[in-house]
Image (cartoon, grey):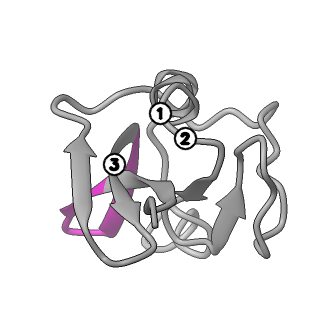
Amino acid sequence: MTPEWIAFIAEECERDERGPIATGLFSGHLESDDGTFGEFIETPLTVAEALRWGRARTERVVVRVAGEEYYSAGRIPGIEPPLDETRRLDRRRPAGWESRYS
């Protein structure tokens, strides 16, 4: 049986004295339904670039935005809510950290 692949894409974070910073850059990898790992994103990408990377390799793409839940962004929807691709995901404080220590 041929394994089915899922692209997992996640936003990278940094920290400073005020807490986490979402970078707006995404890393990712392919993982099969039998737990085998495939390709990895070698250099962090924008969300649009990371989505193109994942969609070019598989029909199921799952995205984790920093400080939030998982979203579905592939041609085959998952159980996750769909990713709003119109959102700006630039460098910022994750949800809940925006006004701390300001």
Identify the amino acid type marked 1: Arg
How far from the left and from the top, in percent, is residue 1? 46, 67
> Which residue is rendered at x = 49% and y = 46% of the image?
92
Q: CA distance from mark 3 to mark 1?
A: 12 Å
Q: Most prominent secondary structure in the magenta stretch? A: strand
SS at mark 2 in the image: loop
Q: Which residue is mark 3?
A: 28
How far from the left and from the top, in percent, is residue 37? 23, 61
Q: Which mark is residue 27?
A: none
> Which residue is rendered at x = 83% and y = 56% of the image?
82
Identify the amino acid type marked 2: Thr
Q: CA distance from mark 2 to mark 3?
A: 13 Å
Question: Contact (CB < 8 A) between labels 2 and 1?
Answer: yes
Q: Which residue is mark 1?
A: 57
Q: Which residue is mark 2?
A: 58
Q: Is residue 16 magenta?
A: yes
Compared to residue 58, the image places residue 76 above or below, namely: below
Q: Quadrant of residue 96?
A: bottom right
Which badge, 3 or 1, comes first in the chain's sequence?
A: 3
Q: Residues within 10 Å of mark 2 (few under 14, many from 20)?
A: some
Q: Which residues are magenta?
A: 13-24
Question: Front-most of 44 and 87?
Answer: 44
Q: Tell whether 9 sits left or right of 17.
A: right
> Which residue is rendered at x = 32% and y = 52% of the image?
12
